[in-house]
Amino acid sequence: MVDLILLFEVHQPLRIKPFIGTPPGSKVEDPLELFDWDLNWIVFDRVAENVYIRASKIVLEALREIEEFKVTFSISGIALELMRRRAPQALELLRDIASTGRAEFMAQTYYHSLAWFIDIEEFTSQILDHVKLVEELLGYKPTSAENTEFIYNNDVACALHNMGFKATVTEGVDWIPGFKGPNHVYEAYTCPIRVLTRNYRLSDDIGFRFSLKTWDQYPLTADKYASWLSKSHGDVILVALDYETFGEHQRPETGIYEFLKWLPRESIKAGVGFATVTEAALRHRPVGALDIPPWNTISWADERDLSAWLGNEVQRLGLDVLKTLYSYAKAIGGSALRAWRLYSLSDHFYYQATKMGPAGEVHSYFNPYRSPYKAQIVYHVALKILEEHLVRLARADYCRFLERFRAPTSLCYHITLSDSLLEACSLKELGEVLEKLPKHIAEEHVAKGYIDKWVREVLLAEGGLEYVRSMCPSLTPVYPSTI
């Protein structure tokens, strides 16, 4: 009997308000003020009612009535936060679903973010923070995890394995070396973690084609779909789709609720079993290893690559800026790091994709700005406001910031000698570099103002090195007496 894994992805974006075309005297200092909370609440409240409450009631009823039925959820920390604040009934339904003992809750990046491309420690921190939240709100400790939007390569798999997870999921991409089809369990190429791959055809039949009247299989009924499942070859079928499919992307009048209600019953009648992600991953022997190096990273979006978020130069520039600002937000901590993390949501980059054809239509559907170019402007203006906010916070408690700050490699102070390259990424390292330098080179860097310029522009001092010495004498290293 083939195992059907129903995996529901749950996430709600936080949209940024367009701070363009405003009066010249307008100014926003707190980057959190840029979020369009009115729109975010309107959308979330509607989705909570139509999906997180109505669809969850159907799932809970099936779990209580059908002993063989099982389901898996992957819910972002942002979505859980919003439920706790705006839809406690939705959260209570998830608790009831968890209490049945036949639902799994996966871990993911707390902010459904692009943290993987920023910093491995941040990626790890977000996933562990998410695990804590799931335990706190749902009483469940995740045993499997995924990267945002099924973004996956060998290194992602090893990072999740090192955190103790037993299984992960990604897209079933036909060109993967050694790929034998989506309906099998695999092992990661470099780490002993099990991998399930999404059957995108069967998943998209529900997610995208369910209400498409020009589709030759319209209308899609639960018994028809169950017959397709029963005829599928392999050990497992991972059907993964946005939970918002049930009542939001596919509206109630399409019959999507009835489909969800009858799918478990018709599947069992057709001889299809159910399993959760971890259960299925450990139950079946892997048929091979998936070798996906970083330069061939895959996802479940568009062309199954990274182009949905990093496909154009403006998106990549935004990621570079976000990565630079991370070093400052991390050193400041607290509300600054929280603000930075809210700007790391993958949705901000998704809206900026300049796609054509079917992929472009999907991006346009989700884009609150109705234009990728407007989304690009909005995000980069917001990043500039975030940058100015971080500078103010760093200078407000400068010595603490200076003690914790280490610049990204691109902003480190570099000195090239005949036989070596010296690098300083913090105030302490600057002192160490200056001590190693020949006297005449050290004097030259001081005299020409190179060091003062770096201290002002990278370490955010309001003056040069002498200013730093006067402000934070306990942090200033001992320099050669000539400097």
Image (cartoon, rainbow, N blue to C red):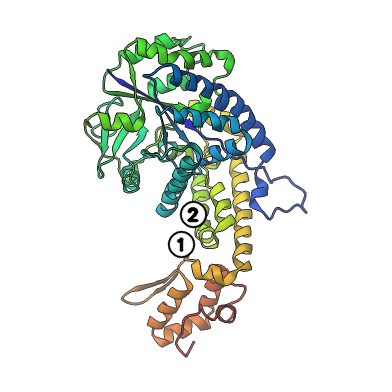
For residue 112, above or below residue 335: above
Q: Is residue 36 left or right of residue 423?
A: right
- Residue at figure coordinates x 29%, y 34% from the top left: 176
For residue 387, above or below residue 406: above
- The amino acid type, in three-letter code, at marker 2 is Lys
Question: Can residue 459 be seen in the rendering of this structure?
Answer: no
Q: Is residue 153 left or right of residue 482?
A: left
Place of residue 17 in the rendered image (x, y in percent of width and height, measured from the top left): 66, 42
Q: Secondary structure at mark 2?
A: helix
Question: Can residue 371 be seen in the rendering of this structure?
Answer: yes
Quadrant housing the N terminus: top left
Mark 2 closeness class: few <14, some 14–19, many ≥20 residues within 10 Å: some
Checking the image for residue 323, the label placed there is 2
Task: Determine which residue is flagged by label 1.
Answer: 408
Place of residue 110 in the rendered image (x, y in percent of width and height, measured from the top left): 49, 44
Q: CA distance from mark 1 to mark 2?
A: 8 Å
Q: Earlier in the sequence, mark 1 or mark 2?
A: 2
Mark 1 closeness class: few <14, some 14–19, many ≥20 residues within 10 Å: some
Checking the image for residue 254, the label placed there is none
Place of residue 217 in the rendered image (x, y in percent of width and height, measured from the top left): 43, 10
Q: Secondary structure at mark 1?
A: loop
